[in-house]
Image: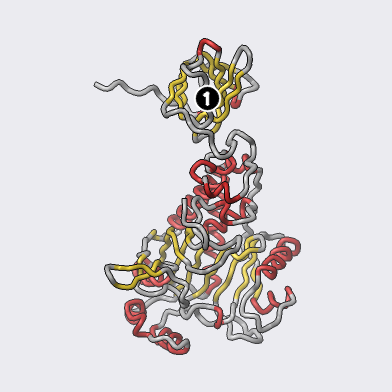
Amino acid sequence: MRPPAPARTLAADLGAAEPGSTVTLRGHVHRRRELATVAFLVLRDRSGLAQVVVRPDELPDGGLPPEETVVEVTGRATPNAQASGGVEITSPRIVLLSEPAQTPPVELWRPTLDAGLPTLLDHAAVTWRHPRRRAVWEIAAAGLRGFRGTLDDAGFTEVHSPKLVAQASESGANVFGVDYFGGAAYLAQSPQLYKQQLVGVFERVYEVAPVFRAEPHDTVRHLAEYVSLDVELGFVRDHRDVLDVLRDVLAGMFDAVREHAPGALDRLGLVLPVVPAEIPVVHFAEALRRVGAAPDEPDLAPEHERALGVWAREELGSDLLAVEGYPLRKRPFYTHGWTGEPVEGGPWTNSFDLLFRGVELVTGGQRLHRHADYVAALEARGESPASYATYLEAFAHGMPPHGGFAIGLERWVARLVGAANVREVTLFPRDLHRLEP
């Protein structure tokens, strides 16, 4: 019968080990230092760092293994106030679990990575090992946990929609075409059409999945593939009900980061924003006036968003600001018209963008739900309702008033950690120029 493997102790738990007890750690060699009479090996695992003290007669054959070699270390837990967690490993037996590692493209043992973005991205499988880099995605993972947990508690059902579709998910030609058994298909720009249909089934749905945009943007905020956190809910009165759910979702995401990724926050020196009980809202027309833009502008430019972010922070005490009522000509065909108090200009819509620290983070709003309205909206845009027959079927058979939103995960993380470029927080980014690694 196969003997059991020695119980593994994680670096973060080493401080709780009984002094003098034998422990086994497994991980990468993070740093090694050889002095005249003693050597030090710092081991890195998923939980943190642990120091190993190695006497000359305890060195493995070939000496201390190089950085990034995977090892197993069994030794004595010895109190040392200078060591991480107050405990180090002495009298070690070091066993290599991989070949001696090649020299990494960056020095991962340094507190910060002094490397340009191309180097970080070209060698992503290695550079993500750095504790500060890894902290970024630990925050993302905790945020996803909060996203799902908040919606699960609110009666939502997680769904998964096709990523190979027969037509563009949204108006426009910025789609990736693919060969589908000799026919034409596209990578989905959004789960929008499917999540609306599923409101008629489950009433409240959400999805976490990649979306694809063949937009030739080469900016610090755009990707050709990103993770979209999509939500759709039925029986809403208007877009403000959707915004209320979004507020709770964001609060849940930040709370989950506090609970599940405190070490990552410490490594990055981050203080999370406080989500107000009610997110401040400004109408699009008023937003244009505040930033000095022409009243017929169809959208907010990045510099407008930044200015509004400063205003929200200084005057309203909020990192979050919702801009509602975007012009109909800027929104997709399924967007519901404005039902609030009359505002000069327009026509406006029951839609919004949420700005987070001066950058658009979320687009959302109320959708049309009557079949006749969809037929009229498509015809007004010169599109054939017959092209959307399978989508419109759900509305012909009765759909509740509904709305939803989508959060770009990478953009949320970028704003949270203060990254200058969304690629810094994307595990393996895809953009206009990058298809590898």
Residue 339 is at least partly visible in this image: no
Label 1 environment density (alpha carbons within 10 Å; few <14, some 14–19, many ≥20) = many
- The image position of residue 71, as x and y in percent, is 46, 26
Residue drawn at (52%, 10%), measured in percent from left and top? Answer: 57
Q: Is residue 61 above or below residue 159?
A: above
How many circles with numbers are drawn on the protein? 1
Residue drawn at (58%, 18%), measured in percent from left and top? Answer: 39
| Observer-nearest of 233 and 174 | 174
- The image position of residue 135, as x and y in percent, is 56, 43
| Observer-nearest of 280 and 355 | 355
Residue under pointer 1: 14
Q: Quadrant of residue 169?
A: bottom left
- The image position of residue 111, as x and y in percent, is 64, 36
Residue 109 is left or right of residue 10, and the answer is right
Q: Is residue 309 above or below residue 61?
A: below
Q: Is residue 58 above or below residue 125?
A: above
Residue 292 is at least partly visible in this image: yes
- The image position of residue 427, as x and y in percent, is 50, 50
Secondary structure category for the residue under label 1: helix
